[in-house]
Amino acid sequence: MANATKLRSLVTPKQMERLRDYVPFIAIGLVILLFWMISGDRFMSVRNWTFIAQQTPVLMLLAFAQLIVITTGSIDISVGSNLAFSAFVAALGMLWFGEFGLILGVFAGGLVGIANGLIISVLKIPSFVTTLAMLIIMRAVVIIVSDGTSIYITGGNISGGTNISSVSAPWLLSLGQFPAIFIIAAVVAVFMWVFYEKTAFGQQLRAVGGNEKVLRLVGTNVTLFKIKVFAAAGLMVGLAACVNLARAGAATPQAGLMIELDAIAAVALGGTPLTGGYGSVVRTIIGALTLTVVRNGLTIAGVPPSWSQVALGVLLIAAIAISLNRSKVDVVK
Amino acid sequence: MNNVDAAPPLLAVENLSKSFGGVHALRSGSFKLNRGEVVAIVGANGAGKSTLIKVIAGAHVPDGGRIVINGSEIPRTEHSVSHMREKGIEVVYQDLALVPNMTAPYNLFLGRIPKKWGIFVDQRKMRKKTREVLDTLNVTTVQDLSQPISSMSGGQQQSIAIGRAIAWGKEIVILDEPTAALGPNETAEVERIVEEVRDRHGTSFILISHNLDQVRRLADRIIVTHHGVTSREFAREEVTSDRLVRAITLGE
Ligand SMILES: Nc1ncnc2c1ncn2[C@@H]1O[C@H](COP(=O)(O)OP(=O)(O)OP(=O)(O)O)[C@@H](O)[C@H]1O
Ligand SMILES: [Mg+2]
């Protein structure tokens, strides 16, 4: 008790606020140190970090999509199914129209986003329910369209095996490997930062999350804006789908299963409140990286997958419990 | 046109009505507002005052009645907040209508954010204008313009809301209970601002207030609303507080 008050008087509320902003950075630092201590060079090797750099981008892009939506106070849990769907459309696009058909994957993601946005803002069905329905529907659509099989991206012309759908696109596969995939992720991250921090659209995301009613009162077309928000998130998912296609080398019906939870967790680990109004691109990147590193570190340390999940859940609660400014929260639902 | 006629009033509303489901919030709202005039609207809680001004501000489309600005009627199809804003009508709402997690400049420019190259927020322009507005309002306590306004005091937030209305409301500024939550000093300050802006720019004001002394200090005319009807009108000189209370409570 006495210690707590002493600590309070040592750090001013403003410094405390600053400190909270750094929680994601401190957390990832500690996590890396911890795994380094446990697994030594097996964790801290160039090979392993190359692997991490390859694993993080898809999750990061999905976390960006989630960040866009969460900042407005909504949520999009359809990103995983949308990822699988968009990847399929991208692969089919390449199958039918050649290499440029890949771009159809991005548009497919955007279309699913627009559908989400329309249902939410025109039919006024909450985003959680709408995107839950979309999660179920799009996964089913993928299974129907694919007939349960995958479309493979190959490095050369394969002979025979005519019942396997495959597209020859060595360039795409190389984009999914380390330096290229990392550079793509970095470029998208820079664009995302500019979009989120500097544009009027990015600012309006926060304003809608802060007080949507007021924006309506001053004549802003919030309905249209929300459709655009979900469309933007959908385009980001479509992009993630193309990156995932390059990395995995196949569009599979199971792609992105449950990854929506990782995307939400990454945003939350980045200190963004799910109630909307605030958010940060840099800390969302850190959140996605933390998630990937913890999963990777636990695997290397030999922790069974189920226990890894338990550890991740605990980490999520701990990180948010520390970074939450309770004096600013009056209602918890 | 017959130029012997006097100029039409700046604003004339006739028999405005608005229901929400079964609630007849506003049955018949009629009054006129001349240029440079301060008109007060008084009435009991739930009498329909806020509904009346929200219709005038464009936030609610009326069920019936007419709004005429400078002699031309606002068509129902164009009845929107944006249209009324273009006509120079701004409101300080009862609950201020601010976005708490955004900065003072953002709130001041809410709904009309200036852009650079079509997409970027023009922060510099917003800050400059915010400083100007706060200066004209004599507000010196708001220093850090990068803070969200939720970290400001109620009085400071009030100045942002009033500053926004005065900065953009070239013709009519509507104040819905602007001093209800303020202390005596801040109340006097708001009253000073109203008189100064009216004298300097010829802006017209519609003032909703439960403070009858304040109403008699500021308003040229006083409109009484009773059960959704603008039932009586008084000139400032002819009315006593007792008379107003009778009109408000009994509608007579
Ligand atoms: N958006 C709405 N939906 C439903 N009912 C409403 C709405 N706005 C106002 N009302 C109802 O209309 C009536 C008039 O409300 P209004 O806010 O205009 O009163 P007021 O005169 O401003 O009262 P106060 O002095 O308390 O602010 C009230 O019964 C209120 O409950
Ligand atoms: Mg009211």
Image: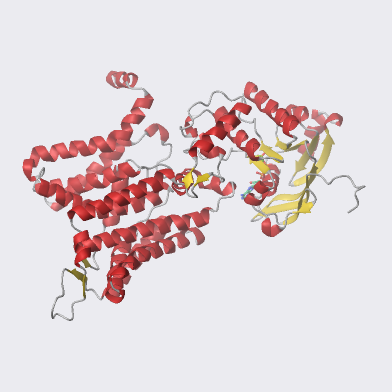
| Residue A312 in the figure: left or right of residue B223 | left
Find residue A208 and report its horizontal and vertical position in percent: 48, 47
At x 40% / y 56%, what residue is drawn? A232
At x 64% / y 40%, what residue is drawn? B168
Find residue A130 and report its horizontal and vertical position in percent: 41, 60
User: What is the quadrant of the C terminus of chain B in the image?
Assistant: top right
At x 78% / y 29%, what residue is drawn? B216
At x 11% / y 46%, what residue is drawn? A46
Q: Which color scheme did the rendering employ for the protein?
A: secondary structure
Which residue is nearer to you in this view: A151 or A194? A194
| Residue B232 in the figure: left or right of residue A111 | right
User: What is the quadrant of the N terminus of chain B in the image?
Assistant: bottom right
Q: Quadrant of residue B217?
A: top right
Find residue A79 and report its horizontal and vertical position in percent: 33, 58
Residue A225, compared with residue B226, is above or below; it is below
Which residue is nearer to you in this view: A288 or B240? A288
Residue occupying the far right of the picture: B4
Q: Quadrant of ligand 2?
A: top right
Q: Quadrant of residue A33?
A: top left
Find residue A209 and report its horizontal and vertical position in percent: 45, 46
Q: Quadrant of residue A330?
A: top left
| Residue A204 in the figure: left or right of residue A220 | left
